[in-house]
Image: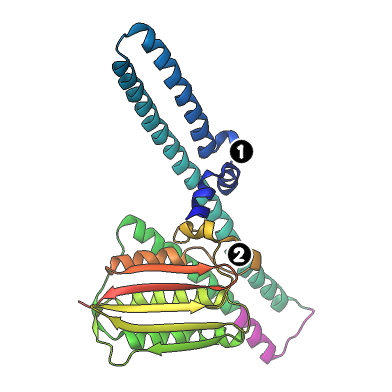
């Protein structure tokens, strides 16, 4: 808590986060306005004591003026902060999308140039290998486009939820099976613990599967080779409780409040040069909330991260 508060008061950190010069930084503007309010309070008190004989009335007027200026400064600074945040997210969106698309497009271009070259004559087996690489790169671009479409529908309020009676156990097994190849390739151990006789209840299986796959993929992506991922699911009261714990890089304390924002990626994953659009957790949170559930996490840098969510059975 103290670190988060210090991060808010650290003007240079906040300016760096928004990529703004200090004179345009919301926190610096708030500091300047605070100094102005103090000066205005002192001046109004001095003028009041000369024009009004009752010290209580002077103090009351001074408090009203100070309170009004403080509220106005807070509103102004919050407006600047929202504009700065929107600008930062727009820049991150452009950087992430361009980076995510550049790599597969470059790979596809290289492969097509190679196959069309008259100087090479690859074997049939080699051609199949190249076409498989092309298919993987096209799939990567398709996944990014799908995520952007989901985000667009969420923000427009046109995100459909089709609830039906389904087995959450089968859904989890499918999600783990889909991502198990990545875990094996990275030599990451996966342990799944599911309580027996979990009830079948109404939810949207396609949406919940997307949440599970996002959380599992993140755990694999941000865990070093040789690490472990543990998944637990059980019934708690009238809720299904889901937990996924990894031994990965963790999330810095000062960045944890941004983790469910669009296009946000913490410094640790960026330093590790892991792939990601910064949309998975935002989508997961919105889906869980649409299903009337709750999602949260705990994380320690260098130790790992645990994500949790609960869903009402009824």
The magenta span reads 119-133
Q: Is residue 62 above or below residue 293?
A: above
Mark with earlier residue (1, 2):
1
Left or right? Give the position of 194 relative to 144: left
x%, y% of residue 301? 57, 67
Give the crowd class for mark 1: few <14, some 14-19, many >=20 residues within 10 Å: few
Q: Nearer the viewer, residue 24 or 171?
A: 24
Q: Is residue 278 above or below residue 179?
A: above
Residue 117 position by quadrant: bottom right
Q: Nearer the viewer, residue 272 or 102?
A: 272
Question: In the image, what residue occupies the spot 53% across and 60% down?
Answer: 253
Let me know if residue 175 is in the magenta part: no
Residue 296 position by quadrant: bottom left
x%, y% of residue 225? 63, 82
Left or right? Give the position of 205 relative to 98: left
Alpha carbon distance from label 1 to label 2: 24 Å
């Amino acid at each position: 808590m103290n670190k988060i508060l210090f991060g808010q008061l650290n003007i240079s950190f906040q300016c760096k986060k928004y990529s703004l010069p200090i004179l345009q930084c919301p926190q610096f503007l708030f500091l300047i306005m605070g100094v102005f309010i103090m000066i205005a309070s002192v001046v109004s008190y001095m003028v009041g004591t000369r024009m009004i004989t009752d010290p209580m009335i002077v103090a009351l007027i001074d408090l009203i003026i100070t309170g009004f200026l403080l509220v106005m400064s807070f509103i102004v600074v919050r407006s600047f902060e929202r504009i700065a945040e929107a600008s930062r997210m727009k820049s991150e969106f452009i950087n992430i999308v361009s980076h995510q698309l550049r790599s597969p497009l470059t790979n596809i271009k290289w492969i097509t140039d190679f196959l069309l070259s008259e100087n090479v004559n690859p074997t049939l087996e080699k051609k199949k290998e190249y076409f498989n690489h092309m298919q993987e790169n096209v799939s990567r671009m398709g996944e990014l486009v799908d995520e952007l479409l989901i985000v667009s529908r969420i923000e427009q309020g046109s995100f459909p939820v089709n609830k039906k009676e389904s087995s959450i156990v089968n859904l989890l097994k499918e999600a783990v099976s889909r991502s198990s190849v990545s875990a094996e390739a990275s030599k990451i151990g996966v342990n799944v613990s599911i309580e027996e006789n979990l009830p079948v209840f109404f939810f949207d299986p396609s949406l919940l599967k997307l949440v599970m796959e996002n959380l599992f993929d993140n755990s694999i992506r941000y865990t070093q080779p040789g690490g472990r991922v543990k998944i637990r699911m059980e019934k708690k009261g009238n809720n299904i409780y889901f937990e996924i714990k990894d031994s990965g890089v963790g999330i810095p304390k000062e960045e944890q409040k941004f983790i469910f924002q669009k296009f946000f990626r913490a410094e640790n994953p960026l330093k590790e040069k892991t792939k990601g659009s910064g949309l998975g957790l935002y989508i997961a949170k919105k889906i869980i909330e649409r299903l009337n559930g709750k999602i949260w996490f705990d994380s320690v840098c260098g130790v790992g991260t645990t994500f949790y969510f609960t869903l009402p059975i009824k």
